[in-house]
Amino acid sequence: MGRMRYTTIGSGAGSRRVSKIALGAMRFGTETDAETSYAILDRFVEAGGTFLDTSNNYAYWASGTQGGESETLLGRWRRDRGIGEEIVVATKVGARPTDTVASTPNGWAAQRRRRWEGLAPANVREQADRSRERLGVERLDLYYAHVPDVSGVPLEEYAAGFAELVKDGVIGQFGLSNHWSWQVERARAANPEAARPSVLQYHHTYLRMRTDIPDPRLSVDGEIGVADASLLAYLRATPGLTLVAYTPLLSGAYTNPAKPLDPAYDHPGTTARLAVLDEVAAETGATRNQVVLAWMLGDSLPVIPLIGASSVAQLDESLAALDLELSQSQRERLDAAGR
């Protein structure tokens, strides 16, 4: 296992020092059983990891529930292991289904058609209380708006709702996930400094994803959840913001031929970047996954890779990237590929 690195998210009273790698708990308690989940969590903490990520809707698509299984497992693990405030737990609100289904024969595709809760301030506060209860914490360290509101609530109104939770000590920091960069700016402008969004969570990896493919649920203009050039430029220009990058390893597609890349990666830039990625992997003796993580960890932008793992072995592979130092030449070649 590599030697953990640390950074600070947020500022003021709600700021927290966290590990530079975060561990996603999306499948814990559903697709990943409790014993395996505990083993992964224990290894992450043993390696110095202090930043966990979940949501109030994880993983509703696994068995037709409304979610909450991941938070529940994390709460039980915290109690069983005597975990206190040394571990930062981020969770989310806004995409939890309000209905129930008997089964999920078509998996995620069928689940996306279910009704989501939205971000009305009353619901956000109620769900914060439920998340705190499941997690067994007095305050949510970091609370994201998971997606833009889907029920007609104006952005300024739900941003103000998160600000009230910060003021009341219910949450430490307000985060935004899967919003357009203009929405991030508008939410930051609407809230007082102590309650401005301080952490952003988007899909970000070494390969560049097309963002012009409409998302029928969230935007006819394209894919809203990707850290595109506009979002990265905003991050670069805004001191105090941190990007938490989800699915940095493409759910195994970098290394597992059985998991093809998303069609949004089907463009010439992908071929060029994969070729350089393989060159650097051969030079360093590392895996593609480890090179991707090392590239992200060494970025001049404040980026925290959010990794997933379904086994301790997968986690260990990712943690080994902490010891991989890319040369300036390797980083320059990786950055320039596909231009």
Image: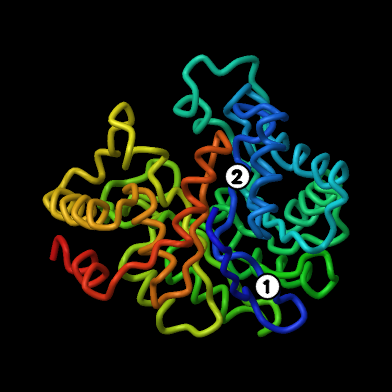
The residue under label 1 is which amino acid type?
Answer: Arg
Foreground residue, 298 or 15? 298
Which mark's residue is nearer the viewer, 2 or 1? 1
Q: Who's the residue at 27% across and 56% down the image?
A: 208
* Residue 157 percent location from the top left of the image: 65, 67
Assess whether mark 1 and mark 2 are in contact (beta carbons under 8 angstroms): no
* Residue 29 percent location from the top left of the image: 69, 31
Q: Horizontally, is 68 left or right of 186 in the view?
A: right
What is the C-alpha distance between the residues marked 2 and 1? 28 Å
109, above or below 305, in the image: above
Q: Horizontally, is 267 left or right of 155 in the view?
A: left
Q: Who's the residue at 77% across and 55% down the image?
A: 122
Quadrant of residue 77 in the image? Answer: top right
Q: Could you say which disc has been placed on residue 17 in the image?
A: 1
Assign a secondary structure to mark 2: loop
Foreground residue, 299 or 184? 299
Q: Horizontally, is 294 left or right of 281 in the view?
A: right
Q: Could you say which disc has been placed on residue 117 in the image?
A: none
Quadrant of residue 104 in the image? Answer: top right
Number of marks in picture = 2
Assign a secondary structure to mark 1: strand
The residue under label 2 is which amino acid type?
Answer: Ala
Q: Which residue is mark 2?
A: 95
Quadrant of residue 12 in the image? Answer: bottom right
* Residue 171 percent location from the top left of the image: 77, 65
Q: Residues within 10 Å of mark 1 (few under 14, many from 20)?
A: some
Q: Who's the residue at 69% across and 52% down the image?
A: 46
163, above or below 239, in the image: above
* Residue 128 percent location from the top left of the image: 78, 54
Q: Earlier in the sequence, mark 2 or mark 1?
A: 1
